[in-house]
Image (cartoon, rainbow, N blue to C red):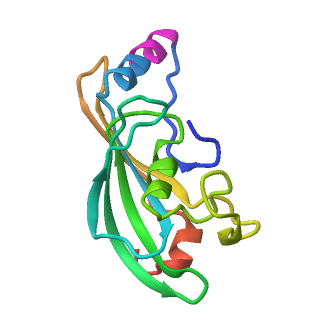
Amino acid sequence: MDYATSGLLLIGKTSASIIMLSQLFETKKIQKTYHAICIGEMKPMGKINNPIDNKESETVFEVVETVPSKRFGFLNLVKLAPKTGRKHQLRIHVSEIGNQILGDKEYGNKELILKGNGLYLNASRLEFIHPFTKENIYITKEIPKKFRKIFPNQ
């Protein structure tokens, strides 16, 4: 978990549920979707599979909407789906293709920071099979208000 990221957080209430959820995460049986605001011109969709810490890593992205920006050239609302779970994977991957996440102080150009607004990365969807009931669980959260200020149609 990246503490600068907003949005959904999955928590187990019992020891057994915590263990089962951890196993689902480890075996990649929980599909996660994030939304981020990325800076600069981007391809409409793609896959980033640059290794992180010499380990295989993969992120699929899709640009949902783009708006022009005087300061940044373009701002993009991007849907991100990590296929692996490396620390700071999404932040590293989009930065490596030249489209840092707005507000990213660690993996971005320090000149492109919006002071006081934090990181524009939000965990917006989780999908998995409940470990006990076997029910398909689909949890979503709308994008934060600070995202909608830039992309009011979302």
Which quarter of the image is occupied by the C terminus?
bottom left
- The one nearer the camera, 60 or 33, is 60
18, above or below 41, in the image:
above
The residue lying at 52 percent from left, 21 percent from top is: 13
Q: Looking at this view, is 20 or 27 the one in front?
A: 27
- Magenta stretch contains residue 112: no
Residue 103: which quarter of the image? bottom right
Q: Position of residue 55 (x, y in %)?
A: 40, 29
Is residue 65 positioned above or below 23 on the image? below
Q: Which percent across, then down, holds residue 138? A: 31, 42
Q: Nearer the viewer, residue 152 or 93?
A: 93
Residue 18 counted in the magenta span: yes
Residue drawn at x 53%, y 41% is 88
- Left or right of 71? Residue 74 is left
User: As displayed, is residue 125 above or below residue 17?
Assistant: below
Helix, strand or loop for the magenta stretch, by majority:
helix
Looking at the picture, how far across and down is residue 49, in whole percent?
A: 32, 44
Work out which residue is located at the far front of the displayed protein and give it.
54
Which range of residues does the magenta coloring cover?
15-20
Q: Which residue shows up at 33% across the image and 68% down it?
A: 63
Q: Is residue 67 above or below residue 117?
A: below
The quadrant in which residue 126 appears is top left
Left or right: 20 as drawn, with respect to 3:
left
* In-image side of 35 versus 100 (left or right): left
The quarter of the image holding the N terminus is top right
Q: Residue at x 32, y 57 (%)?
A: 61
